[in-house]
Image: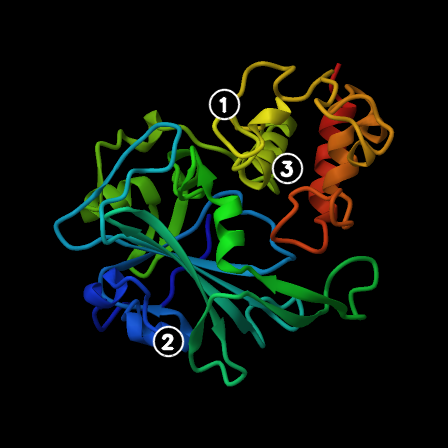
Amino acid sequence: MLAAALAGPAAAVDDAALAAKRPPKLLSQTGLFADPATQKPAAGVIPFAVTTPLFSDYALKTRFVYIPEGKAARYHDTEAFAFPVGSVLVKSFAFPADMRRPDEAVRLIETRLLIRRDDGWQAWAYLWNDEQTDATLNIAGAKVEIALAGIGETPDKPLRFAYSVPNKNQCKACHALGGTIAPIGPKARNLNDIFSYAEGPRNQLAHWSDKGILAGAPHPSAAPAVPDWRDQSAPLETRARAWLDVNCAHCHRRQGPASNSGLFLTYGETDPVALGIGKRPVAAGRGSGGRDFDISPGDPDGSILIYRVESTEPGIMMPELGRSRYDHAAVELLRDWIANLR
């Protein structure tokens, strides 16, 4: 079951402010939150979660969708839904003081908005103030020092690192699809799971349909779904593929920025070579780490994919944006998957 929703909504979204060429200076001025500091959504703003989330240096994330009254997103089996003009996708990033107590001493760092305009999507980031009362529009990006306990082999010793709030151009790098900006997360397979709304737990696809913000969706039993990569009851391959899909396939797909690599990591990819199994890299170099194959079956240490996802060195690490650490548990999952390939 996905994360619990926050308390019920109030207030109203400012459609005119969000439709402006440049959004408001303060997050509170968008009207998306009744109470920004507690992430309490305004009326018509619906919380959601993805089954397997993107790793962002251990950040906790809350997600919301806003679709103007009387409009609806159009369902698609494999791609992000087609959202109408005026829609907003909201994602806040936060860190607790200790990952063993994720609901305590939580510090909001940034809130990102994807706003659907007449001419396409626009991405904006808001940086939270030290008082945790509001967030300010930030175009140039920022570095925020984080001290996070409860991680790794010495959990009582805080992990210290600089978290990167992206600049506007960096947002485009991850959200590029066919030369335009596009959402990544709100796909059927990522939303086909139970979420604890204020009204009670419910399948997200069914909830969106009943709320009138999603048109054309089948019954959840007929829609695609991915497992939570941490769910050890799910098959090893599906867990590994779900992690690669959400962390890598926004670039490594046939229409993505990394299409020239020939490595396609979308969940539905069926060609083993395109998936990297027994595939030599298009361009060898220091990014290969001296390894010959993207994925060498039965040999995690001989696989370029492992070398790059566990690296934190710029120019080698993958994904190349959105992280400065690597997810040890996810790398172990990928190692197990590759070790069992034949």
Helix, strand or loop at label 2? It is: loop
Q: Is residue 264 visible?
A: no
Where residue 237 appears, x then y in whole percent? Answer: 63, 26
Choose top left, top right, bottom left or bottom right for residue 210: top left
Is the residue 289 above or below the residue 277 in the image? below
Q: Nearer the viewer, mark 2 or mark 1?
A: 2
The residue that label 2 is drawn on is 26
The residue that label 3 is drawn on is 232
Distance in Å between CA atoms under marks 2 and 1: 40 Å
Nearer-N-terminus badge (2/1): 2
Helix, strand or loop at label 3? It is: loop
Is the residue 97 above or below the residue 219 in the image? below
**Which residue shows up at 52% across the image and 37% down it?**
250
**Which residue shows up at 68% across the image and 42% down it?**
318
Q: Residues within 10 Å of mark 2 (few under 14, many from 20)?
A: some
Is the residue 116 above or below the residue 249 in the image? below
